[in-house]
Image (tube, grey):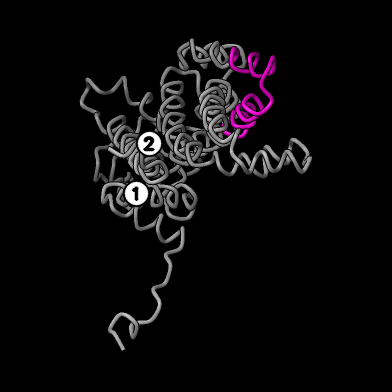
Amino acid sequence: MSATASAGPVKEETPFRRFAREFAESKLAVAGLVVVLVIAALAIFAPFITPQDPYDLAQLDIMDGRLAPGALNGAGTMHYWLGTDDQGRDMLSGIIYGLRISLSVGAGSALIAGIIGSALGLIAAYVGGKIETLIMRLVDLQLSFPAILVALMILAFLGKGVMNVMLALVIVEWARYARTARSAALVERRREYIEAAECLALPRWRVLFRHLLPNCLPPLIVIGTIQVARAITLEATLSFLGLGVPITEPSLGLLIANGYQYMLSGKYWISFYPGIALLVTIVAINLVGDQLRDVLNPRLKR
């Protein structure tokens, strides 16, 4: 008996294992994924791991304002490892709580925009005709304006608030999903499985969302990951400009804005550490998104 025969049949690699193996080929992407998971865990469990609730007035002391990193509070019982801001809030606690708002707004707006945009893109590709023309002209109109400008105009009308920021980001993001979904759906539109489903007289909604959508998911997953980072950046910019989330629900952008006026006086840590947290978050998400693009669409692999 040959050595090959005695070794037994070779197990077929499952799609998930193949995906995991190909994703792990990039050490930077794996590191980015670990960072994203750690940041998400910090944001979720913030009330249980932070040394202070930075927005509970009973825990704050104005006399602890603008303490340098590593300083003790007035009672000598607590270290402010990253210093405090002008209100005496612990910067480490503020950053972790700020991550909750930034990630919630970024992921929530990207998810809602993805659902709306993907549905419209699939409908445009499958139905065609005047409906496709109308949807794609709206997409072209939306993408012709800078996203930050549109978001500023919306928030100037609606006012501050987490929900208002999410609504503004959904409005400026949906068009990218629609264009991506339409492009992917046009490729799949004339495949045999779609024609077979139509020959069976299946309802259009079933053909769209049961057969066409699953085969258009890879590019939508990739753009969704990138759009989360983009949404976090836009939210931080809006909050820095004073039109984002209110001061009672601070994000990383608002924390950076709070310390901007103290930069020249040497109190760098009030803006510096939230800025580093924002940078690390966006870079980690983009690293994951880049590798997802390479794995899900090998033709684009660099």
In this view, the residue in front, 256 or 189, is: 189
Q: Is residue 61 visible?
A: yes
Give the amino acid at mark 1: Val
The image quadrant that residue 70 belongs to is top left
Residue displayed at 43% across by 17% down: 241
Give the image location of residue 179, x and y in percent: 53, 24
Give the amino acid at mark 2: Gly
**Image quadrant occupied by the C terminus:** top left
The part of the chain drawn in magenta is 114-138
Residue displayed at 64% across by 19% down: 132
**Image quadrant occupied by the N terminus:** bottom left
The image quadrant that residue 298 belongs to is top left
Give the image location of residue 86, x and y in percent: 36, 29
Q: Is residue 222 magenta?
A: no
Left or right: where 259 falls relative to 227 = left
Determine which residue is flagged by label 1.
Answer: 35
